[in-house]
Image (cartoon, rainbow, N blue to C red):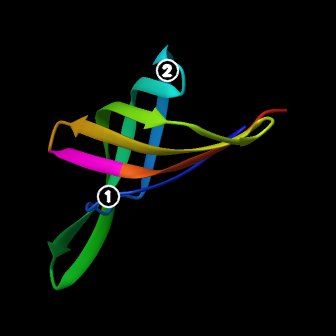
Amino acid sequence: VKLEYVTSSVERDIVGLLGIAFEPVERLEVTAAFGAEFVAKDEAEEDEIETEREAEGLLRLGVAYGFHLRDGVSVAPEFNTDISASRVTLVYGLVFSVGL
């Protein structure tokens, strides 16, 4: 089970990803994921502001380095780059993993 907390300088509503990860050396994880981000866009229309959500394709490339706390429990700082049609965003955070 993996729980991630990530943040970036860009406000986004939802990011959905499906990816692969491999460990070229012990505790270093390299990831590549494909998915979509749903971005809120405000549009002014006759003195009213409407918020619409648009989906954009997304490629996430990243690395994480795991620290084992005890049997089956680890924490890893992670750094990712999200690449979409409209921007490139640095995303960073912590991953908490518990083996079941």
Pointer 2: what residue? 21
Q: Report the front residue among 44 and 39.
A: 39
Tell me where residue 17 appears, x and y as whole percent. 47, 33
Q: Residue at x 36, y 44 (%)?
A: 37
- Residue 75, image x, y percentages: 60, 46
As helix, strand or loop, the secondary structure at mark 1 comes to loop
Instruction: Name the residue: 17% across, 74% down.
Output: 45
Give 42 or 68, whichever is nearer the viewer: 68
Residue 51 higher or lower than 47, as above or below: above
Q: Residue furthest right?
A: 100
Task: Judge whether 47 appears above or below 84 on screen.
Answer: below
Q: Quadrant of residue 43?
A: bottom left
Tell me the magenta residue range: 87-91
What's the residue type where badge 2 is placed? Ala
Please tell me whether mark 2 sits on a helix, a strand or a loop: strand
Tell me the quadrant of the picture where the C terminus can be found: top right
Q: Is residue 60 magenta?
A: no
Question: Left or right: where does residue 2 sit relative to residue 59?
Answer: right
Q: Picture coordinates of residue 44 (x, y %)?
A: 16, 74
**In the image, what residue type sits under mark 1?**
Ser
Image point (32%, 58%), residue name = 8
Relative side of 38 to 26, left or right = left
| Distance in Å between CA atoms under marks 2 and 1 | 21 Å
Give left or right: position of 82 versus 98.
left
Q: Give the x, y percent position of residue 93.
A: 44, 53
Instruction: Look at mark 1 in the image and give the residue it sits on.
Output: 8
Nearest to N terminus: mark 2 or mark 1: 1
Quadrant location of the N terminus? top right
- Residue displayed at 26% across by 48% down: 90
